[in-house]
Image (cartoon, rainbow, N blue to C red):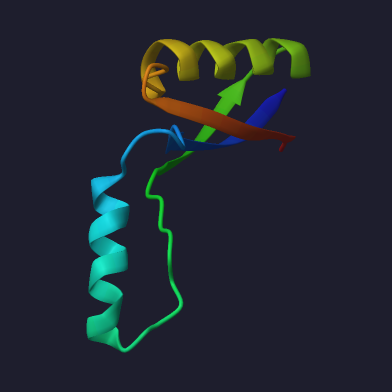
Amino acid sequence: MKFIAEIDIMPHRELLDPQGKAVVNNMKHLHLSGIADVRIGRHVSMTLEAAGETEAREKVETACQKLLANLIMETYHYVLKPV
């Protein structure tokens, strides 16, 4: 079976996010107010082959834990859909 995993990787809430801070600080130049918190992360879309959903989840978990996310600094969440 073919699956698509939509993966969001974000910095831990406890860590500073200098990119997000820069975006918030520059909103005033666009005359945008009321924006207090911006967190910037990554989105990964992955197409994969697997015998079933369990195997597909194992593949996505392995990819996230060993390659895509730095677990010391980041968290990840994904949605897996059959194609």
Which of the two residues, 3 or 5, is positioned nearer the viewer here? 5
Residue at the spot x=32%, y=54% of the render? Answer: 20
Using residue 74 as the reference point, say whether residue 31 is left or right of it: left
Foreground pick, 3 / 23: 23
- Is residue 36 in sight in this rendering? yes
From the top left corner, tell me how far across and down residue 62 is, in percent.
Answer: 52, 10
Residue 32 percent across, percent down from the top left? 37, 84
Screen quadrant of the C terminus: top right
Q: In this picture, is 12 found above or below 64?
A: below
**7 lies above or below 52:** below
69 relative position to 49: left or right: left
Residue 40 location, x and y as percent?
37, 49
Nearer to me, 4 or 42:
42
Image quadrant for the N terminus?
top right
The image quadrant that residue 69 belongs to is top left
Determine the residue located farthest toward the bottom in the rendered image.
31
Q: Is residue 52 visible?
A: no
Depth check, front residue: 27 or 65: 27
Q: Left or right: 40 with respect to 45?
A: left
Q: Residue at x 42, y 27 (%)?
A: 74
User: Is 56 placed left or right of 66 in the picture?
Assistant: right
Question: Which residue is at 66% across, 30% downward?
Answer: 3
Q: Quadrant of residue 58?
A: top right
Residue name at image x 41 percent, y 58 percent: 38
What is the x, y in percent for residue 16?
31, 40
